[in-house]
Image: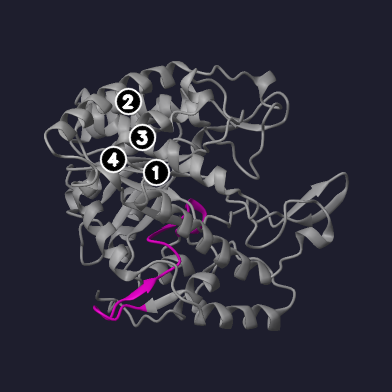
Amino acid sequence: MNTSQSAWTSRTWRDRTALQQPHWPDGAAHEAVLEQLSSLPPLVFAGETRELTDRLADVAAGRAFLLQAGDCAESFDTSADSIRDRLRVILQMAVVLTYYTGVPVVKVGRIAGQFAKPRSSDTETIDGVELPSFRGHIVNDVGFTAEERAADPERLLTAYHRATATLNLLRAFTKGGFADLSRVHQWNREFVATSPAGQRYAAIAEEIERAVQFMSACGINSETLTDLRQVDFYTSHEALLLDYEEALTRRDSLTGDWVDCSAHMLWIGERTRQLDGAHVEFLRGVANPLGCKIGPTATAEEVIALCEALNPERIPGRLTLVTRMGATKVVDGLPPLLTAVKESGHPVVWTCDPMHGNTFTADDGRKTRHFEDVLAEVSGFFAAHRFAGTHPGGVHLELTGDDVTECLGGGAEVVTADLANRYETMCDPRLNGSQSVDLAFRVAELLRNGTH
């Protein structure tokens, strides 16, 4: 990959303004941890990132659909069961999308690295006490004491090891039989199965099982056809802490490219997408497929400039633009951007993040989102693409496989009084399993009805 726009190394970002970086009280300890990280094995391999770029090229061309989903902010305390259940929901959603549309689904998790979170303020004040903001478990703890909120560089190493364990588990599940299509019924957890969406899913599962039985009778089964038994699953996270990302950047022995081996795909957030900023500078030089969040204030000129900076060679599948407009702004705000990028000839993947533009504070003081607002933004996203003559490539969601009550509405009809029951997120509210499957059906209907 050519990075000759200007000389690039994995450290040139340090000459730019790097927003959203924590203050490490002990600089020597921080540097010692980074040195350790730089000597550890990669979490993912360069060949896997190239493979994902090829899959995303199919999405950009309208031959596949991207489902990118997972936790808002991963916890160091996440159990193996919770990781399994998050994967299960993503697999259920992918089955729904593929069954209804006949289109392959590229599955990318916000997982095995989504430990850092941007904050609107460096500090937080409770009852007159001001402390550093919680920036995710990779930096500090959610508890509100001076000790818990102090940035601890040892957490960078913990994040690496947690990501390693999560990746091992994901690879075991996706390649070891858990993802076998003959198990589609077993993926339906009790609390999902009792919802309207879960019942619709059960009906699909029965039809798939009959099809699998028919193929087996014809001599085609999971023993003879690997694609029935295994799935390809990729990881992603926001590349927020640039020193951590730099420490895990390695040279690809086959191509000579630099690859950020902390995840298959990395994205730049809405708060850190400045063209002259450190995040754009760092990520333009790595060969991973990249994402960039695009909010309602983005102009066509800014978006084109980001495309030129992050994908100057116009490699299909290299760049995904993740729009997060809000339900009331997407229909008017998105078409000019779609048209400008289309006319520029940049082969981007367009996906919709319907979560971040629709967050509000409920009467009980908790941050939440309403399922109908999430659905409205997805519907507006599809309508905008229909208007512009472009392809709606995917969705980017915050969800969990746990039976939480963090987002209102959906088939389970969560109301404000329910939020306190199981409000477990460390940061932003997530769709639960039932709401996620419900949304998959709605998205599948939009795709199948040819609204693009």
Q: State the separation of the CA atoms marked 1 and 2.
A: 15 Å
The residue singled out by tag 4 in the image is 336
* Earlier sequence position, callout 4 versus callout 1: 1
The percent coordinates of residue 411 (x first, y second) are 48, 18
Which sits earlier in the primary sequence, circle 3 or circle 1?
A: 1
Q: CA distance from mark 2 to mark 4?
A: 40 Å
**Residue 226 in the image: x percent, y percent?**
23, 49
Q: Which residue is mark 3?
A: 183
Classify mark 4: helix, strand or loop.
helix
The earlier-in-sequence mark between 3 and 2 is 3
Which residue is disc 1 drawn over?
A: 178
Mark nearer the viewer, 3 or 4? 3
Residue 258 on the magenta span: yes
Element under label 1? loop
- From mark 3 to mark 1, how far is it between C-alphas? 7 Å
The scheme the figure's colours follow is one colour
